[in-house]
Image (cartoon, grey):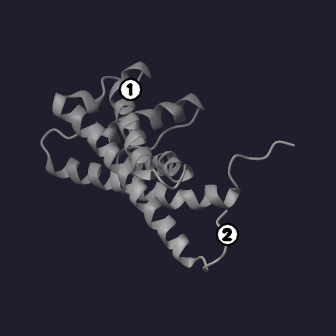
């Protein structure tokens, strides 16, 4: 019988740091959207993809604020699941995993939208928006790494002395 690569409780525990990374990313995006003149508009890409997906399955997508809220919820969920990968590796290198996953996600957010039929990416409007997109996804990965480090430290301090680590 093949065993799963990680016990379910470890996978479930990894969701917390993943959601921390997703929340950090969303907070930065939403704050910058209100302040910067030419911010990366990943929310626009999210709305385009959500509309496209709902129409593909025969539904009628929401409009305006409701669509934006649904997109933010979907972003938090999908980015939370993605950034939870930071907590699934060996406990010694969460910052490296977080930086690499964030960097890859940011590059994907800049390069993939036109190839997926989502139009010219708002993350490519200017060179600075592309750079900010990659930087903010990297920040999300590092936030997930920090939360992972805190989780591991708290778990290790809760273990009684003399008990073997598994």
Answer left or right for 35 relative to 109: left
Please tell me whether mark 1 sits on a helix, a strand or a loop: helix
Which residue, given by chain and number where applicable, does mark 1 sit on? 113
**Residue placed farthest to the right in the image?**
1
Residue 2 vertical position relative to residue 127 in the rendered view, above or below: below
- Closest to the camera, between mark 1 and mark 2, is 2
In the image, 73 versus 24, the foreground residue is 24
| Image point (54%, 71%), residue name | 156
Residue 106 vertical position relative to residue 11 in the rendered view, above or below: above
Residue 38 vertical position relative to residue 90 in the rendered view, above or below: above
- The image position of residue 145, as x and y in percent, is 42, 55
**Residue placed farthest to the front in the image?**
162
- The image position of residue 86, as x and y in percent, is 49, 49
Which residue, given by chain and number where applicable, does mark 2 sit on? 164
Q: Earlier in the sequence, mark 1 or mark 2?
A: 1
- The image position of residue 78, as x and y in percent, is 50, 46
Q: Could you tell me which quadrant the C terminus lies in?
A: bottom right
| Image point (36%, 51%), residue name | 142
| Image point (18%, 28%), residue name | 127
- Structural distance between the alpha carbons of marks 1 and 2: 48 Å
Q: Could you tell me which quadrant the N terminus lies in?
A: top right
Q: Which mark is residue 94?
A: none
In the image, 81 versus 144, the foreground residue is 144
| Image point (38%, 26%), residue name | 113
Residue 49 vertical position relative to residue 147 in the rendered view, above or below: above
Number of numbered discs overlaid on the protein picture:
2
Query: Based on the displayed image, in which of its 4 quarters is residue 135 positioned?
Result: top left
Please tell me whether mark 2 sits on a helix, a strand or a loop: loop
């Amino acid at each position: 019988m093949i065993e799963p690569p990680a016990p379910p409780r470890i996978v479930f525990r990894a969701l917390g740091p993943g959601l921390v990374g997703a929340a950090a990313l969303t907070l930065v995006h939403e704050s910058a959207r209100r302040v910067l003149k030419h911010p990366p508009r990943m929310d626009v890409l999210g709305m385009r993809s959500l509309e496209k997906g709902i129409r593909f399955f025969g539904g009628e997508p929401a409009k305006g604020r409701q669509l934006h809220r649904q997109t933010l919820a979907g972003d938090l969920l999908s980015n939370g699941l993605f950034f939870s990968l930071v907590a699934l590796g060996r406990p010694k290198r969460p910052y490296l995993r977080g930086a690499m996953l964030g960097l890859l996600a940011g590059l994907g957010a800049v390069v993939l939208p036109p190839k997926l039929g989502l139009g010219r990416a708002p993350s490519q409007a200017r060179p600075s928006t592309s750079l900010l997109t990659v930087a903010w996804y990297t920040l999300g990965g590092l936030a997930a790494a920090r939360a992972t480090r805190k989780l591991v430290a708290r778990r290790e301090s809760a273990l009684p002395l003399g008990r073997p680590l598994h």
